[in-house]
Amino acid sequence: MPRIAIRNPNRTILIDDNYENLVFRAKYTAFFAQPALGQLIIRTQDLDVPIINGIPPVLALRVSSPGTATGHILRTKIIGSTLRVTVYTNISVDTGDCTFEVYAFDTPQAQSTGSGVVILRNKSTGRVTFDSDLRYLRVVDSISGTSATSRQYDNTRKHAIVMGHLQYSVTTDVIYLESSGAWRWIADWNYITTRWASGLLNVVNMRKQVRREADSGSGGGSWSQSGFTLFVVDVTGF
């Protein structure tokens, strides 16, 4: 049992000294302008997010476009005390611009300076579990499924998503092109990506194909993960 517990009128515990909610640390942005016809298209950017106390932050993503551009976090890589976040968009000459906002969340212990009017510490560990000066992760919805969907939220608020389970399928093959006398590696990707238009969230199934030169006829295979789960979080004012 917690030593201190704050309950709502329904007697549900909102805050206690055992539970640690995640705390907003910083926002990182990336912007992709719609390319002109014939212009080189760059679809990825890297964002470097510091790691505090050796624990990578939880990332919430908001991808906005006035058109049809979508985006997602392509990969993350730990480099020393930095988490390198690579974002990807399907932007093209007719999709409109695309803006990424990545929100980093840590534990209260990683962010607290102990200056809040209310500070809670776990008796056993001494860790800060609540500091009233901090801004906390607010989950307002969760969405699970296997196909594209849309959902409307209050457009006077700002929302982002935390991906809990990613749906994807990848099929690769290596083929020999007799016309050119060369091997080609081919990969077909199907994956879930998102776009916000004001308060409307669009969850979209996208397909991408990659082709490049190969040295031999080996390297084919299939990998997949069915079903996605994402959490919608309120980031108004962050």
Image (cartoon, rainbow, N blue to C red):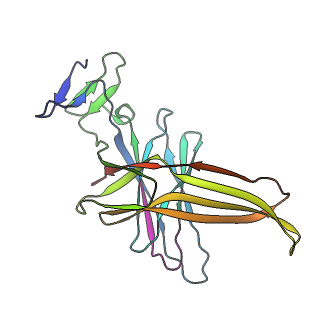
Q: Which residues are magenta?
A: 90-102
Vertical arrangement, residue 146 with respect to residue 35, above or below: above
- Left/right placement of residue 187 relative to residue 29 reads right
Q: Quadrant of the N terminus?
A: top left
Q: Confirm whether the magenta stretch covers residue 157.
A: no
As drawn, which residue projects farthest toward the left?
9
Q: Residue at x 47, y 65 (%)?
A: 70
Residue 158, percent from left and from top: 29, 58
Vertical arrangement, residue 16 with respect to residue 227, above or below: above
Q: Residue at x 13, y 33 (%)?
A: 10
- Left/right placement of residue 62 relative to residue 77 reads left
Of 47 and 216, nearer the camera is: 216
Residue 84, percent from left and from top: 55, 49
Report the label total: 0
Quarter occupied by residue 164: top left
**Predominant SS of the magenta segment:** loop
Q: Residue at x 70, y 57 (%)?
A: 172
Residue 86, percent from left and from top: 55, 55
